[in-house]
């Protein structure tokens, strides 16, 4: 596993998300009260961009069809999605947000 710098903390305000491209994957990075979480950006239902979804606490809702996911575990919480999304470990070093890939 390698640590990859994907953003600075200033680029992802509290309560917001950012989509980043890492290799051939789109990853959604979320800032929840200063703690960062990373999941696959694509909803398993129809590929909706989770980074553009509504974030409430540690739950994001897909903007296309309303499937919800726990960003700490990747677990799907309601239909229409019927599978989880991949999560990635996040580390913050100084002001750099890094993920393990």
Image: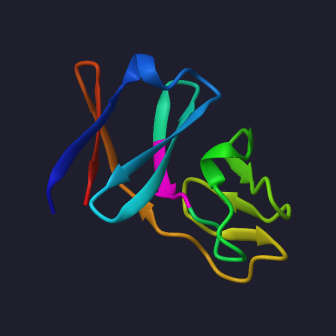
Residue 57 locus on image (x, y percent): 71, 39
Residue at coordinates 34% horizontally, 31% vertically from top-left? 7
Q: Is residue 28 left or right of residue 89?
A: right
Q: Quadrant of residue 20?
A: top left
Q: Is residue 21 left or right of residue 38?
A: left
Residue at coordinates 44% horizontally, 22% vertically from top-left? 11
Residue 99 locus on image (x, y percent): 29, 48
Q: Quadrant of residue 64?
A: bottom right
Position of the C terminus, as image quadrant, is: bottom left
Q: How many marks?
A: 0
Q: Is the magenta region chiefly helix, strand or loop?
A: strand
Q: Is residue 20 left or right of residue 99?
A: right
Front-most of residues 47 and 12: 47
Vertical side of 45 occupied by 3: above or below: above
Position of the N terminus, as image quadrant, is: bottom left
Residue 40 locus on image (x, y percent): 50, 62
Residue extent of the magenta highlight: 37-41
Q: Determine if the magenta segment contains residue 10.
A: no
Which color scheme does this rendered protein use?
rainbow
Q: Determine if the magenta segment contains residue 38.
A: yes
Residue 88 locus on image (x, y percent): 38, 58
Q: Quadrant of residue 69?
A: bottom right
Q: Is residue 37 left or right of residue 91?
A: right
């Amino acid at each position: 596993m390698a640590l990859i710098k994907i953003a600075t903390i200033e680029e992802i305000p509290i309560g917001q998300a950012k989509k980043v491209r890492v290799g051939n994957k789109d990853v959604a990075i979320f800032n929840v009260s200063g703690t960062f979480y990373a999941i696959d950006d694509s909803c398993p239902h129809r590929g909706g961009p989770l980074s553009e979804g509504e974030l409430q606490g540690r739950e994001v809702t897909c903007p296309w069809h309303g499937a919800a996911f726990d960003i700490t575990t990747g677990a799907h919480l309601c239909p229409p999605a019927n599978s989880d999304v991949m999560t990635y470990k996040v580390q913050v070093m100084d002001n750099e947000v890094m993920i393990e890939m």
